[in-house]
Image: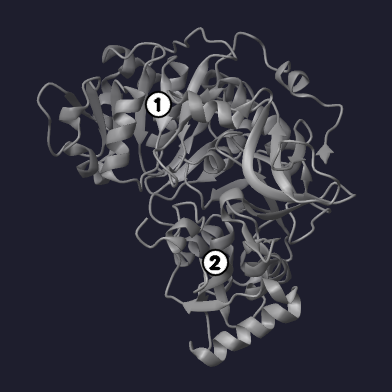
Amino acid sequence: MASAGTDHAAAAADTIPRDYNFAADILARNLTAGRAGKPAFIDARGAWTYGQVAERVDRFGALLRVLGVQREQRVLICLLDTIDWPTAFLGTIKAGAVAVPVNTLMTEDDYRFILADSRAQALVVSEALYPKFAGLLGGAPNLKQVIVSGKVTSRHPGIGHHAFEDALEQAHPDGITAATTRDDIAFWLYTSGSTGKPKGAVHIHANPRLTDELYGGPIVGLTEHDVCFSVAKLFFAYGLGNALTFPMSAGATTILLADRPTPDAVAEILRKHNVTVFYGVPTFYAGFLASPALPAREDLKLRCCVSAGEALPLDVGRRWSARFGVDILDGLGSTEMLHIFLSNRAGDVKYGASGKRVPGYDLKIVDDDGAIAPPGDMGELCVRGPTSAIMYWNNRAQSRATFQGEWTRTGDKYIEDEQGVFTYCGRRDDMLKVSGMYVSPFEVEGALLTHSDVLEAAVVAWRDQDGLVKPKAFIVLKGGAAGDALARALQDHVKAALAPYKYPRWIEFCADLPKTATGKIQRFKLRDPKA
């Protein structure tokens, strides 16, 4: 079943002039609107106005040119969420080089691969993260310069090392903008690599602006009066839109947190800065609701909450709405599409579903043979829209498998109802087939999460003694005593809510579940503990 409208990708892309530089545009629109003195970002060092950000970006671009970084060459960015992140990201793009922000929680092997794959000429890294790279620099023949946010504690022969703030102060803010077009490559975002080596999704200058025109503006409705905070960090596609593209497009203010977003830290930020727009992930919403740090309703100024990364469990959405009087707009996006293209929206929220297509995108559900699935049937969701990455860098096989003409395969299984509402069933690789019938792990997890003792749940395929596949559940408790009695109670709880064949045959209680830095549950690690 396909969900499409008259608004096509080409029409959206035509709103952007051919000669275009995303960084220059997003800075200029705030300066010309008289917001030079308005805070754009607030981090641990204080508030940074739009005028200060623009100057820092120009200085960083000038620094790259002095260091010999040329147009289209890659700059690897491994920074914590401070003012230095937007400075380096936008400064690289404005200078016409290619920004490659990466996950700060990757392994040394991942960084070794990305340094080689990207052929980065420069590395921008936080002092706390530098030790992960120190032993890799000698094996990165293309790397010429390292810029450290903080102190330079060691150096590698043959590679220039610079302290970020000192180098920025010495650079002359010449105001140069590279003569790029909307179709020039602006940045790459590497996928997590949970099923193999990380893949670099290549995005052009037009893409971030289009995510704001299609989602940030019309769905979230940001204005210059908003204060935003995102649990997802800037190096993720979701976090990049939340904490940079959307607020800067509207002239809003973003709060940056360098550390891990614990319930205590987030509660303090929401209260102290009167955050109006909060971007979370399902595991954080669930953990926050169970935390003693959860603020009172009257302590917060929230007007909009958004969730992505994984499908939001129905019970979590309902409890959040009851607690704070603000709905969570659950949606689906991806690194390949840059941000959310399927979403609930204010006044039209259906918890337990991902909502309807975002205008500007087309969606279709296909069966295992690639044909359009009949109405109401489960199949793989494919999306078409103007923000799609153009390829995975240096990976033709995966590019061809994912980017099929105008359509991008998501790998997510969905069902669409007659009203155009899409309900998530699970990842393609996570689906179970029990007694010849598909079982959605997400559906079973949702049933488990309605039990008062369950904080988190993950369901995976498991083989019994006869080699037949059955559901197994891994449970993190918020109350109750782990044991056979509770396990049987949970199984009965699922049987009462779903078709009996879907209940988990095994229940394993655990202290926590393996997750990515965005809070996505890594079910493959539960299926294979050695992964």
Q: Nearer the viewer, residue 485 or 130?
A: 485
**Measured from the top left, where is residue 480 in percent x and y?**
53, 88
- Mark 2 crowd level (few <14, some 14–19, many ≥20, 10 Å Cα): many
Q: Which residue is mark 2?
A: 458
Q: Nearer the viewer, residue 204 or 200?
A: 200
**Measured from the top left, where is residue 519 in percent x and y?**
50, 56
* Residue 195 placement: quadrant: top left
- Badge 2 marks a residue whose secondary structure is strand
**Measured from the top left, where is residue 434 in percent x and y?**
65, 65
Look at the picture and state if 150 lies above or below 422.
Answer: above
Q: Nearer the viewer, residue 43 or 340?
A: 340
Q: Nearer the viewer, residue 400 or 20?
A: 400
Asked if one can make out residue 454 in the rendered structure from this viewpoint, the answer is yes
Residue found at x 49% / y 51%:
518
Q: Amino acid at mark 1?
A: Arg
**Measured from the top left, where is residue 10 in percent x and y?**
75, 18
User: Dividing the image into 4 quarters, which one contains the N terminus?
Assistant: top right
Q: Which mark is residue 204?
A: none
- Badge 1 marks a residue whose secondary structure is helix
- Mark 1 crowd level (few <14, some 14–19, many ≥20, 10 Å Cα): many
Q: Which residue is mark 1?
A: 56
